[in-house]
Amino acid sequence: MPDTKYDCAIVGNIPVKRFADLILDIGTFLLASGAHSGRVESNIRRMALTWGFDVNLQPTFKGLLVTVRSHCREDDTITMFKESPTHVVHFEVLTKVSHLTWKVYEENLSIDETEKEFDKIKAMPHYNPWIVSIAVGLSCAGLCFLSMGDVLNGLTALVGAFFGSLFRYKIAALRYNQMISISIAAFITTTITGLGTVYNIGDNPQSAMATAVLYLIPGVPLINSVIDLIEGYLSSAVNRALFAGFILLCIAAGMTLSITLMGIDNFKL
């Protein structure tokens, strides 16, 4: 990208606060949808370059801090912070926001048009919980087969993962803490698959117990933590790693409680 692209005669009337509000909305929305810090910054800088602003960002897991200065009005500067909404991974949103910021850069989209387009993106529905839960069940069944489970073990893993995922969505919809929904989902999934171990269903019932909870593994935070660490966003990387680690602890707590209550003392894969 070139160092300058803006024309102050055209974009010089954009208030700094309006631009700051827009990039905070976009940035926190991207963070909550599963974007790593570098992606958030590159999207925001495309718009800043087009409209004549200098932006300094400090992304964290909980929100985004920005300082914005206008190149067209040197004394017009603002610093603002906004918390991100609840983190729900939605990769389609990341793609559409990226397309929007490239459209701003390449077609000189106005801030009015950009705000309208972004409002449409924010109004996009989340993935259907039933479809996601079915996909989760099928994927865990596939992992069970890879772990030497038979058809019965695969079906057990499918049912356990499906109901665990579905309950996780239902509990999250009640606005409870995310860690509570993960712990309960791990407990439900392990209880269902644990029945296969108690009643010795299939050739390798332990494989169903071990693989059915893998849908809860926080892959996106772990990957983003590594990316942020490589790109130099150290505070964000540490925050994401701690968040992912606590999710793993909640999974272990839910599984341990279920295994203990069911009296399974010989669990091994």
Image: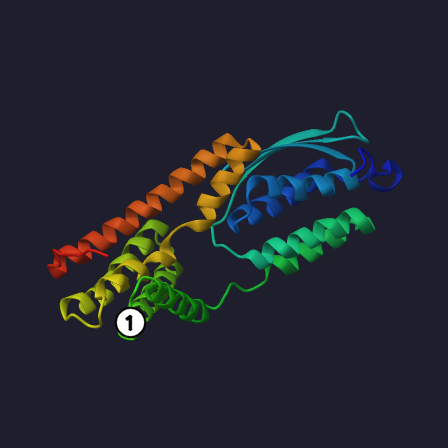
Can residue 40 be spotted in the picture?
A: yes
Residue receiving disc 1:
150
Q: How many marks?
A: 1
Q: Position of residue 232 (x, y in %)?
A: 55, 31
Name of the residue lying farthest toward the right: 9
In the foreground, 210 or 117: 210
Q: Position of residue 245 (x, y in %)?
A: 35, 42
- Where 61 sits versus 182, above or below? above
Instruction: Indicate the quadrant where residue 185 lies.
Output: bottom left
What percent of the width, then of the height, locates residue 134? 41, 71
Q: Is residue 143 above or below residue 46?
A: below
Of residues 185 and 8, the one drawn nearer to the viewer in this rendering: 185
Q: Name the residue located 18 percent from the left edge and 68 percent from the top edge.
A: 195
Quadrant containing the C terminus in the rendered view: bottom left
Q: Residue furthest top?
A: 75
In the image, what residue type sits under mark 1? Asp
Q: Quadrant of residue 123?
A: bottom right
Residue 202 figure quarter: bottom left
Say which quadrant the N terminus sits in.
top right
Q: Reply above or below: 245 against 235.
A: below
Left or right: 268, with 176 as reference point: left
**Residue shown at 63%/58% (left/top)?**
121
The answer to whether one can see residue 24 in this image is no
Residue at 56% across / 49% down in the picture? Answer: 29
